[in-house]
């Protein structure tokens, strides 16, 4: 950002030049949407000022339009599942990036997140609301090393293992218990203070997990821990990462192979990767999908696993993360800490359970039972109907066209007869 651009951004963000005692024009951090500067308030407090890049809103809107144009252009070339996945990625990216360019949205996320997780043991920046606007956010300046700064963490005798466990527990709390999570925990947004405190920055990308997705993740973890691979595939289908009609038995066999590879402590990371790619090559025709709810969950999981490999050899989600996730499942399902609390809760819930049973029995007696299909099941039914009707419709069009050709010119009866025969064959062989 050159000087003239900086002045434009600064003046649009701060109507008063007297807000700060000092303001460093050279940024200490830069990203695609904003840049972070150091400043001091008049009382001497050191703050971090995040300024939105000049004209970035317009550039982001233009980029989204270009993405949508090329997606619509090439969409006919992709399979149904690839189309859905690309649409989900572009839609989620567009929605999230437009929220990220609004620092008022980030301020709201920071305040909300800090309140929800105030007992987490993780430190968050303190916002100075009186100086914030849509193009700037002013926060307390947090000192620390990047999470992947191995040299400084070792230099200050900071043990990484408790840190990664704390991070995994924190994200377990976010995704399984609260359903409200920070979706961008890359190393630049995770700091470690010299005394080992974990600091989380940048709240432009905060997501809520729908309850059905949260339950599917819990079932996924439980099935993985118990090595029940058919249930694991079923949970993936409910999560939406595998199509409803995908062959459960074959995918369960594939999952068992992948779990065996990544839980083998005798393999190096390179050999794990090669073996995993060999197994993945056999699944290229399976109907995998990428729903919008799963995009950030998979991204966060990959980032945390990547951070783990910085310090722990052969660190991976199955042997290093899964056990910690499994420990939190009872709490995620609402289990109480003690047996007494569990009994008391069960007694309190008993009248509602009995009422639900009575209502269900009454509906069965009155023949008033409804069956609800999931979105994936409805999508599969619609696709199957479309695949069945399409050749029938095509055959019908050819037959009608053959009659019109005869009416138009009787000398083209041979051509009309061929069209009629092709149309009949299409309908006959489809039926």
Image (cartoon, rainbow, N blue to C red):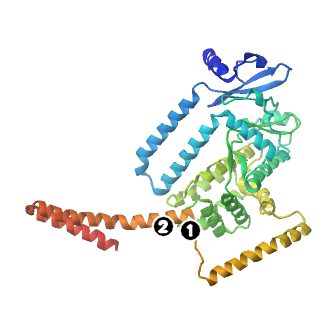
Residue of label 1: 373
Secondary structure state at the residue bearing disc 1: loop
**Horizontal and vertical percent position of residue 49:** 73, 26
Q: Which quadrant does the N terminus fall into? A: top right
Q: Is residue 203 left or right of residue 384?
A: right
**Horizontal and vertical percent position of residue 77:** 41, 51
Write down the quadrant of residue 259 in the picture.
bottom right
From the viewer's side, name the closer residue of 55 and 368: 368
From the viewer's side, name the closer residue of 417 and 154: 417
Q: How many numbered tags mark residues here?
A: 2
Instruction: Tell me which numbered mark, 1 or 2, is placed earlier along the sequence.
Output: 1
**Horizontal and vertical percent position of residue 16:** 72, 18
Residue positioned 70% across, 64% down in the render: 219
Whether residue 195 is visible here, answered yes or no, is: yes
Q: Which quadrant does the C terminus fall into? A: bottom left
Q: Is residue 66 left or right of residue 16?
A: left
Whether residue 187 is visible here, answered yes or no, is: no
Residue positioned 76% across, 43% down in the render: 112
Residue sitting farthest toward the bottom: 365
Residue of label 2: 381
Disc number for residue 317: none
Write down the quadrant of residue 244 in the picture.
bottom right
Secondary structure state at the residue bearing disc 2: helix
Mark 1 burial class by Cα count in 10 Å: few <14, some 14-19, many 20+: few
Q: CA distance from mark 1 to mark 2?
A: 10 Å
Write down the quadrant of residue 93 in the picture.
top right
Mark 2 burial class by Cα count in 10 Å: few <14, some 14-19, many 20+: some
**Horizontal and vertical percent position of residue 196:** 86, 39
Q: Are circles 1 and 2 on residues that touch, CB within 8 Å?
A: yes
């Amino acid at each position: 950002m050159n000087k003239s651009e900086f002045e434009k951004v600064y003046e649009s963000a701060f109507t008063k030049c007297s807000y700060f005692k000092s303001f460093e024009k050279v940024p200490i951090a830069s990203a695609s949407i904003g840049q972070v500067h150091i400043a001091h308030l008049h009382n001497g407090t050191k703050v971090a000022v995040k300024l939105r890049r000049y004209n970035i809103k317009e550039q982001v809107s233009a980029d989204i339009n270009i993405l949508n144009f090329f997606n619509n252009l090439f969409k006919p070339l992709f399979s149904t599942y690839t189309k859905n996945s690309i649409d989900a990625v572009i839609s989620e990216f567009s929605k999230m990036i437009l929220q990220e360019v609004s620092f008022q949205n980030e301020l709201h996320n920071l305040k909300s997140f800090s309140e929800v997780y105030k007992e987490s043991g993780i430190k968050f920046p303190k916002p100075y609301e009186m100086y914030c606007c849509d193009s700037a956010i002013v926060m307390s300046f947090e000192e620390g090393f990047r999470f992947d700064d191995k040299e400084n963490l070792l230099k200050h005798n900071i043990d990484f293992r408790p840190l990664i466990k704390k991070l995994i527990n924190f994200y377990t709390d976010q995704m399984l218990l609260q359903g409200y999570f920070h979706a961008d925990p890359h190393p630049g947004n995770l700091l470690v203070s010299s005394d080992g405190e974990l600091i989380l920055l940048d709240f432009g990308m905060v997501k809520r997990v729908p309850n059905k997705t949260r339950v599917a993740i819990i079932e996924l973890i439980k099935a993985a821990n118990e090595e029940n691979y058919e249930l694991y595939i079923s949970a993936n289908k409910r999560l939406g990462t595998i199509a409803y009609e995908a062959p459960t038995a074959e995918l369960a066999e594939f999952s068992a192979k992948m779990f065996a590879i990544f839980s083998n402590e005798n393999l190096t990371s390179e050999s794990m990767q090669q073996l995993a790619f060999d197994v993945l090559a056999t699944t290229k025709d399976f109907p995998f999908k990428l729903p919008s709810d799963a995009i950030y969950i998979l991204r966060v999981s990959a980032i945390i696993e990547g951070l783990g490999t910085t310090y722990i050899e052969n660190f991976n989600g199955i042997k290093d993360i899964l056990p910690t996730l499994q420990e939190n499942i009872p709490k995620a399902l609402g289990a109480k800490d003690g047996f007494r609390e569990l009994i008391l809760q069960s007694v309190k819930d008993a009248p509602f359970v009995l009422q639900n049973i009575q209502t269900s029995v009454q509906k069965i007696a009155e023949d008033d039972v409804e069956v609800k299909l999931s979105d994936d099941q409805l999508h599969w039914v619609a696709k199957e109907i479309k695949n069945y009707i399409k050749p029938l419709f095509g055959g019908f069009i050819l037959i009608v066209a053959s009659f019109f050709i005869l009416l138009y010119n009787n000398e083209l009866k041979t051509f009309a007869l061929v069209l009629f025969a092709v149309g009949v064959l299409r309908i006959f062989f489809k039926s």
